[in-house]
Image: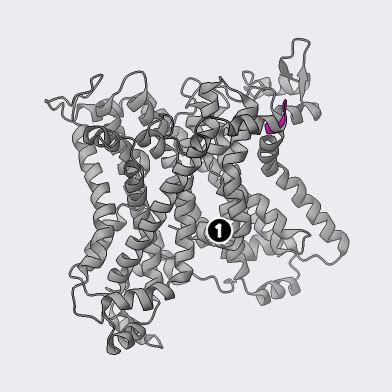
Amino acid sequence: MATSATTASDEPLARAAARPGGDAARRRPHRTSPGLRWILPGFVVSAGLIYFCIAYSGYVSLLPWDWRPRRPATLEGLGSYGRALQDPLFWTSLQHTLVFFVAAYVVQCALGIIFAAMLHSKVYGGNLFKILIFVPVVIAPAIMAPVHRRVFAVDGPINWILERLGLIDVDAVGSRNWTGWLSSGLAQIGLADVTPNWIQPSTSLWVIVAVQVWSSVGIAFILFYASMGQIDPEVLEASRLDGAGNLRVLVSVVVPGLKPTIVALAILNAITALKLFDYPYLITAGGPAHSSEFLGTYIYAQLFGVSSHYGYAATLSMLLLVLALALSITMSRSARERRPGRKVKGVGL
Amino acid sequence: MFELRSRTARLGLTAVLVVMVIPFVIPLYTMVYGSFQGRGWDNYRSVMALEGFYTYFRNSIIISVATIALVFLLTMSASFGFSKLRIRNKEVYFWVLMGALTMPEVVLLTPLVILVSEAGIAGTFWAVIIPLVALQIPFTTLLTRSYVDGIPDSLFEAAHIDGAGTWKQFWYVLVPLAKPMAAAIVVLVMINSWNAYLLPLVLLGQADGNMVVTQLPNSFRTQYTDDQTRILAGAVLAALPEIIAYVALQRHFERGMAAGAIK
């Protein structure tokens, strides 16, 4: 939404002048005095620190800095990068990141669109629903993490509901099992090892996905809600007169108009997936048996695990940085493409 | 969006919505319900009797206020410079700054840990505030610059003709006109700094009196070996300021967070 400025001043004046209004005048820098000192403080604090850290990280990644508190004097060279690329846990973390991204993104978009469409209809108590959907976005993941651990606990609310629905049996000892038919059904589709204990290797990643969906649907909802508000009511009216039902209007008229938001959410989710730390660290600690390990938790474990591997942590950070930069470039590209149609006014039919 | 002709249809859709919202309420309900289990309000009393309970909030407030103030000042002046002043190679500076836009904080973790321990500033607020500020500025500058680009140059020219220098143009023209964007930035930075967990955990240390509000619920896990009721009571107390702030300033929060989503 706010990316248009990046090319504002190198845009050809001819194009700006062709538009009505004073655009050409607006784009001309009007002062001759140097303004460098106005941007320097922010530039030095932000770019200065971040690029310095990256450079330093690059340097540390070349050191065989393990086990000891002092910085080693010799360089190890690029060996640690080769080690990282052959490290199965690195690839596992990346794979989890990808699965997490796809699953959380799809569910978040679908629920966001449905909630936005419903709250644009005349339902009762609209604002209360809005608050309930958006509150999870506001509360810190670190504060909610212990609550989610409780929610997914063996004797927690999720299992309580499943029990009430008759899907889980509690035996005399108090241990929980799927009811007969469900258990054999799960075995049929090869999920025999899944038990109603959620923080276990086969399901812990999905707990993290579910929690992320819980805390991020509100963002998608607010964005979709805003872009739906810009759809011309006459277009909706026209399609209704043509005989389109509610669902037809949603799928064929409304959703195509949401494309810019859907693209923006893909980028946002990809960044979130790469950054992910608080939830997996505090809910599953990346486990059990690395089943919910992400790059963030893996780097943290290298730094503060049983022993400190500063060099290797820096190597992993540099690889993560490359991924984030690739995303940045994709992002600014798509932002430029998005620009002309930024404000969805009416929808192309 | 959906056309509902009758009262029944409206009630029906509302009922569907209620069912769909249930999963969103479960964690909130679990949090509040669990926090009262066992000894009721005594759970809260024992959390608040925790030594240094208020320092969690005090530290978070100090970090948030300092981060907001610094980000606000640095962003406003940088946006003014990028948008309205003549700077040689301006766009080069801008793109270098934008290169840091999607920087995951985990990437900065290793160098920051080493730097902070070698420089001996581990455990000071600056060790947290400066990285937090550094990570916010690229994005807030991107947002604000495009907003300031939309303020007509003629206003600054008029102020210039009336004898206002660059400083006065900044304080009396730009800052008042950029207010709507400022509100979004304040909300966004407030949430990001108040919710920060990893940077304070690593850079401020876990010593008594050095903890921030996001560490409050988890501190009961280490100290009292998974004391569920107090963990949940701690979570309620830690989340309460945010929930109150959101409900009171609902529109600003939704706009600020939505602006923050579209990077």
Residue that carries the numbered disc 1 in the rendered image? B253
Span of residues in magenta: B34-39
Residue A145 sits in which quadrant? top right
Residue closest to the far top = A173
Q: Is residue A93 left or right of residue A59?
A: right
Residue A221 in magenta stretch: no
Is A240 above or below relative to B22? below
Q: Secondary structure at mark 1?
A: helix
Q: Nearer the viewer, residue B237 or A278?
A: B237
- Residue at figure coordinates x 51%, y 60% from the top left: B256
Is A205 above or below relative to A257? above
Residue A301 sits in which quadrant? top left
Identify residue type, mark 1: Phe
- Residue at figure coordinates x 39%, y 72% from the top left: B175
- Disc 1 residue crowd, few under 14, some 14–19, many 20+, Cα 10 Å: many
- Residue at figure coordinates x 84%, y 60% from the top left: B9
Residue B38 in magenta stretch: yes
Residue B196 lies, in percent from the top left, at: 45, 43
